[in-house]
Image (cartoon, rainbow, N blue to C red):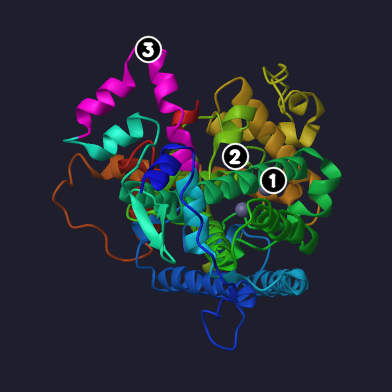
């Protein structure tokens, strides 16, 4: 016993347990985990997308829609079929790459957990040896305090004295060896099962966000990259859930597949962890494109990067802002690329009215073919210089982009300064994309706004004419008598929700 005690008061650490490694059985028999990690995100993508599609089709939550069905119809420059087809293509590429990577992966082996937990417990024990020295610098007599506490708080006394757990021993093969204190094992397990995975997931999220921000930003700041690859994603001016991965295959591979794949490798995730990570990242991306601002969707509240935030990035006036995706917005904040034009509710309401008016007009087979023929107003006050990355946007914008910008500015002004450069740059970007964008998108935008403006003005006139005398008169009930009543009814739920819930609903209003 004397020998053992002497041994323990020395720096002998409790020993690490032996272990035997065995391959981890798959979560689902017949499907290796590394392949399940490829299947789950695809199932989640279509599962969550179908859920949103069902909500869309049944129109269960018009009050939370960012856009109306009419907008989906009238403003997108790609059919649902093409979106579906290209997403499937991307998922095939992603799966082939994943299977290829999995080929080089070793089977994940179990059995080392107790050993690894003991390694953390040993580190804790070693860390305690520094306690007396550190406390001594404050003038505390730790040995004296430890002696006083020994009777009432044995564990605390042992920790204070530098990890001297002389009485804690265990018998191994007939020999008494030092052992870990219960609290050391609890903390070691917490580190192993909670702290380390939390750090891994946090790091992986930061890696994906960083990778995606800078590639996404480059895709917008470099005209060739934009028109060659990224403009495809932006044919969706009104995003919907399964449009989340509607990308050029090169972009889909570079941003999504490589981004999450690298994060997985760098932080050293297990196959089970990667299932969670790939699946959650996928669901987050789908949610960011779902087209709804739900008060009860936890994903939309964890961070300010949500459907409302990303939707701004899909609008013709905000396309060169809000590049951050999919988890946090801090890169936009740090790099000065957040939408800075303030409250966007009015812009959304206007677009809704415009699309509905357009649809109604077409349904009534009285589609108008007006084009923007107004003369070019002289440039006024948008030639100022702005911070990166908008420093050149006002100078390099084409006359057409300026024209469209000024027309819109006339009706729905954007604050002077950086926000104007952002909107002007965004409109130039629409022009740069001759396939999904082009001058017709800006012409439509201008025309739609003009029509909406007229609709609203007529409506106001009608109300004014009616209201003083016929306060209690029955409302006209035929559709010809009040075409706008129907229009208003169809979009009012959305309007009131966006207006009524005020700033914050779109997640970008505080970024002035
Ligand atoms: Zn983009
Ligand atoms: Zn998007």
Asked if the residues shown at circle 1 and circle 3 are in contact, with their CB atoms under 8 angstroms apart, the answer is no
Which residue is under mark 1? 211
Q: Is mark 3 on a helix, strand or loop?
A: loop
x 39%, y 73%: residue: 58
Mark 1 / mark 3, whichever is N-terminal: 3
Label 3–label 2 contact, CB within 8 A: no
Q: Which of marks 2 and 1 is in front?
A: 1
Q: In this view, does 247 lie above or below 102?
A: above
Q: Is residue 488 visible?
A: no
Image location (x, y in percent) of residue 63: 34, 56
- Residue 333 location, quadrant: top right
Which mark lies nearer to you, 3 or 2? 3
The residue positioned 38% from the left and 50% from the top of the image is: 180
Q: Identify which residue, 213 or 49, lies in the foreground.
A: 213
Q: Is mark 2 on a helix, strand or loop?
A: loop
Secondary element at image label 1: helix
Task: Choose between 218 and 432: the one closer to the eye.
Answer: 218
How far separated are the C-alphas under marks 3 and 2? 50 Å
The image position of residue 3, as x and y in percent, is: 42, 45
Q: In which quarter of the image is residue 273?
A: bottom right
Res. 252 in view: yes
Q: Is residue 98 left or right of residue 324?
A: right
Q: Main secondary structure of the magenta part?
A: helix
- Asked if 174 appears above or below 288 in the picture, the reply is below
Tell me which segment is drawn in magenta.
123-150
Label 3, on which residue? 138
Farthest bottom residue in view: 30
The residue tagged 2 is 322
């Amino acid at each position: 016993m004397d020998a053992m005690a002497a041994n323990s008061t020395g720096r002998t650490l409790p020993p690490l347990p032996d272990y035997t490694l065995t391959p981890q059985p798959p979560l689902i028999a017949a499907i290796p985990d590394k392949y399940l990690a490829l299947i789950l995100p695809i199932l989640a993508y279509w599962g969550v997308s179908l859920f949103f599609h069902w909500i869309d089709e049944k129109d269960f939550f018009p009050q939370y829609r960012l856009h109306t069905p009419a907008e989906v119809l009238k403003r997108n420059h790609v059919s649902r079929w093409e979106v579906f087809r290209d997403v499937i293509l991307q998922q095939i590429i992603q799966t082939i790459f994943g299977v290829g990577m999995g080929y080089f992966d070793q089977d994940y082996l179990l059995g080392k957990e107790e050993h690894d937990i003991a390694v953390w417990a040993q580190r804790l024990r070693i860390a305690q040896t520094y306690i007396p020295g550190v406390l001594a610098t404050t003038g505390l007599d730790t040995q004296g305090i430890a002696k006083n506490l020994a009777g009432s708080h044995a564990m605390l006394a042992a920790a204070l004295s530098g990890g001297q757990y002389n009485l804690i021993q265990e018998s191994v093969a007939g020999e008494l060896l030092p052992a870990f204190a219960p609290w050391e094992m609890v903390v070691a397990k917490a580190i192993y099962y909670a702290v380390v995975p939390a750090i891994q997931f946090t790091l992986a999220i930061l890696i994906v966000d960083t990778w995606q921000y800078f590639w996404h930003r480059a895709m917008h700041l470099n005209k060739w990259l934009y028109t060659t690859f990224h403009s495809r994603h932006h044919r969706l001016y009104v995003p919907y859930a399964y449009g989340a991965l509607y990308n050029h295959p090169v972009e889909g591979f570079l941003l999504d597949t490589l981004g999450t794949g690298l994060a997985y490798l760098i932080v050293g995730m297990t196959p089970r962890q990667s299932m969670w990570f790939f699946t959650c990242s996928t669901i987050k991306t789908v949610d960011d494109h779902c087209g709804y601002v739900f008060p009860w969707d936890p994903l939309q509240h964890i961070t300010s990067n949500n459907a409302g935030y990303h939707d701004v990035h899909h609008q013709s006036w905000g396309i060169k802002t809000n590049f951050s995706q999919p988890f946090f917005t801090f890169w936009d904040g740090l790099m000065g690329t957040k939408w800075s034009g303030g409250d966007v509710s009015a812009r959304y309401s206007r677009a809704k009215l415009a699309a509905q008016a357009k649809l109604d007009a077409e349904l009534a087979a009285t589609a108008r073919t007006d084009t923007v023929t107004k003369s070019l107003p002289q440039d006024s006050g948008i030639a100022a210089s702005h911070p990166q990355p908008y420093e050149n946007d006002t100078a390099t914008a084409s006359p057409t982009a300026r024209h469209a910008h000024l027309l819109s500015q006339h009706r729905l002004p954007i604050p002077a300064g950086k926000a104007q450069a952002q909107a002007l740059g965004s409109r130039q970007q629409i022009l740069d994309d001759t396939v999904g964008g082009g001058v017709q998108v800006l012409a439509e935008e201008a025309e739609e706004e003009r029509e909406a403006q007229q609709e609203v003005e007529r409506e106001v006139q009608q109300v004014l004419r009616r209201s003083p005398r016929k306060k209690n008169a029955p409302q006209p009930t035929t559709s010809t008598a009040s075409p706008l009543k129907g229009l208003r009814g169809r979009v009012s739920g959305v309007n009131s929700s966006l207006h009524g819930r005020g700033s914050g609903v779109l997640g970008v209003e505080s970024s002035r």
